[in-house]
Image: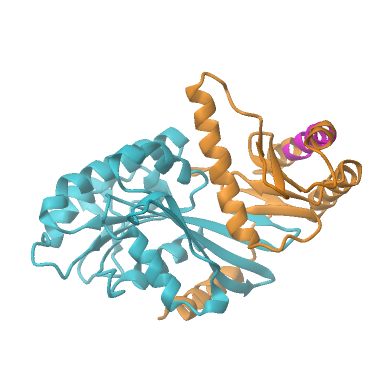
Chain colours: A cyan, B orange
Amino acid sequence: MSMINYASREINCKLVYYGPGLGGKTTNLEHVYNKVAPASRGKMISLATETERTLFFDFLPVDLGTIRGFKVKFHLYTVPGQVYYNASRKLILKGVDGVVFVADSQIERMDANIEAMQNLYENMTQHGYDVTKIPFAIQYNKRDLPNAAPIPELQTALNPGWPVTDPSKQRVTPDPYHDSEYLVRQEDGQWVERAPYFEAVALTGEGVFDTLKAISKNVVKTLG
Amino acid sequence: MSGASSWSFREDDSRRIQSILSAFLGESNARTALIVDRTGQMVSTAGETPAFDATAFASLTAADFSANDQLARMLGENEFGALFHQGERESMYLADIARRVILVVLFDNRTTLGLVKLRVKTAVVQLNQVFTDMFNRDGTSAPGVESEFLGEAEDEIDKLFGS
């Protein structure tokens, strides 16, 4: 629910990084914080435990500048990934404009990824939102690790697609980020849509801005 | 609408809110009044300009209020309609407005909690009306952004996040 403030000529959009614990959500924000020009970003706030595990959320405001007379800002949030922090995780989703699911590619973390994805769908539903109808991207993090699961396996488990019922959206849509892949297409006579996905190594920053660029462009499109 | 409903905040809304907040500040002797949206965005400020990072303050206020909302439910309450945080010199009082935004009052020892609580009641009633009108209006007449906006925004995103 991006808020357009005509009095202060501001548009604020809320992006939430979701996913299993220790998957790299905070690392994504830290990389953005370190690489974006200081004039374009605010202070990063981390409500974390003494062992640097996210307790409530991390928050980083990024200023896109003035466009057509409006100051456009993205507010980047992470949620705590650990299962037992669900109450605070759910709160952060309030008013979300776009979701990035940061998956841990390690094969051992497959169950944790699936559990976090189900939890995302449940928490969105409880807020009355539908994750398949808002800007949504999946980032497969830790691609550099030797035990990283192959992308097709991760896609099958975490991004199997959802049925497209709106006839105006039932058209073949190539995935702009991957050759010969599709975001919307017919499979066994059914129209299916998948979230765009990105490979990343958040620790080195690889893929971090590709993900952020894609999700923020999709969020901006919803303002029109 | 699949996400939460969008809403817009116009200049005439801002004027109505400013006049309510200014009157309240005058009567209560509080320093600053802020309106923060429940998603963590600053909507409006009145009185002394705060020295802190207002964006960060807004996100923490919303989180604070939401967390307390959940605590209230655990106790079998619908909500805590108001919260009070007391410091040695600076204190803050938070009140729910129309279940969508939060009024935050910052005050010091030039006034008392009692006076702030007394005066805030009128302001809350008036603000509830303004925001209820605003939310009821939206979806019918809220103008979107100009069509050129999208292309320019995409260019800025490429510049800021690297192309």
Residue A122 appears left or right of A10: left
Q: Is residue A13 above or below residue B136?
A: below
Residue at x 52%, y 18% (from the top left corner): B76
Residue located at (68% from left, 51% from top): B8
Judge whether residue B21 can be spotted in this image.
yes
The location of residue A100, given as percent across then percent down, is 36, 56
Q: Is residue B142 visible?
A: no
The percent position of residue A200, horizontal first and vertical second, equals 25, 68
Report the front residue among A50 and A201: A50
Residue B158 placement, left or right of B47: left
Q: Compared with residue A128, is residue A175 higher up or lower down, i.e. above or below? A: below
- Label the magenta part by its dominant secondary structure: helix
**Left or right, B128 with reference to A91:** right
At which x and y percent is residue A111?
16, 44
Q: Which residues are magenta?
A: B119-131
The single residue placed furthest to the top in the displayed view is: B76
| Magenta region includes residue B128 | yes
